[in-house]
Amino acid sequence: MSTLPDIDAIIAEIDDRGFCLVPNVIPPAKADEARHALHALLDAEITEQARQARTQRVGQIAVKHPVFLELMCHPFVLAVWKKMLGEDIMCATWSANTTYPGFDSIGWHSDYPYWSLQPPWPPGNFAGQTLWLLDDFTVENGATAAIPYSHKKGHPPPPETSNQWTDEGEIFVGTRGSIVFGHGAWWHTARPNQTARSRSCLLGMYLMPWFIPQEDMRGQLAQIAEPSELVQQLLCGKQHTPNTVGVY
Ligand SMILES: O=C(O)CCC(=O)C(=O)O
């Protein structure tokens, strides 16, 4: 691992601009390991709909290959989110997104839980997105982009402009193994892939523990033999579940 920036500086940038790109959090060889594991899943799971859309999502990755569980628990990632969101964070969704050659869309959006909330959204920090680059991201292959300061708007991108590129967008060009930390309310998008190769990223949303997770994380936890305390926490195993008050 190269020398990583100060965690307080990363959090200050997320707070201020809505995101922070940190280069080379893991070595390229580790990113390659994750990308190879992902490509086996992409091949096994591809549908006609994904072929036509030229984009494919793989969910439940915590239980599909050990490298994904390892990255979900990456100490540097957890150090950032625990400091910003609290020691008791959980992971609300952990998935991969791949765009194939010819993918040609812009779709500005904010992430869960924001899209499930009625605007105006509450200010402050309760959700953080972690975008892992598994390929070198370039302008040509559709590197993810985000709009600075959009996390402060308090509402989703207006539908009439959500499919249009804007020069306000900042494109995350970087080497595989880099991470973009994003405020959950940031407006961001994948971009058209104009190359002959796919490009993939992992997306892990870390949340304060009083939200309903986006994915069925407990279902994944149930499939893991002897999970560590940390894995139990991140896969929502320590989250409060509704009970009947007064009945013991
Ligand atoms: O694949 C990307 O570049 C971004 C995907 C994304 O924005 C998302 O899944 O929320």
Image: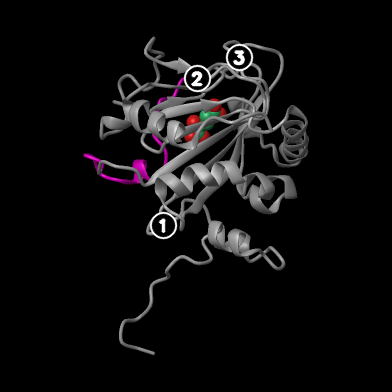
**CA–CA distance in space, label 2 to label 1:** 29 Å
Q: Is label 2 or label 1 in front?
A: 1
For residue 67: magenta?
A: no
Q: In this view, does 92 lie to the left or right of 142?
A: left
**Label 3 vs 1, first from the N-terminus:** 3
In the image, what residue occupies the spot 49% across and 33% down?
Answer: 181
**Label 2 vs 1, first from the N-terminus:** 2
For residue 120: magenta?
A: yes
Give the secondary structure at mark 1. Answer: loop
Which residue in the protein does label 3 denote? 138
Q: Does the beta carbon of the residue at mark 1 sit less than 8 Å from ligand 1? A: no
In the image, what residue occupies the spot 65% across and 23% down?
Answer: 100
Which residue in the protein does label 2 denote? 105
Task: Please report the bounds of the magenta region as a residue range.
Answer: 105-121
The chosen color scheme is one colour
Question: Which quarter of the picture shows residue 170?
Answer: top left
Q: Can residue 109 be seen in this view?
A: no
Position in image of residue 26 (x %, y %): 68, 33
Q: Quadrant of the C terminus?
A: bottom left
- Return the residue nearer the eye: 8 or 193: 8
- Name the outermost residue toward the bottom: 248
Which residue in the protein does label 1 denote? 212
Q: Is residue 115 above or below residue 60?
A: above
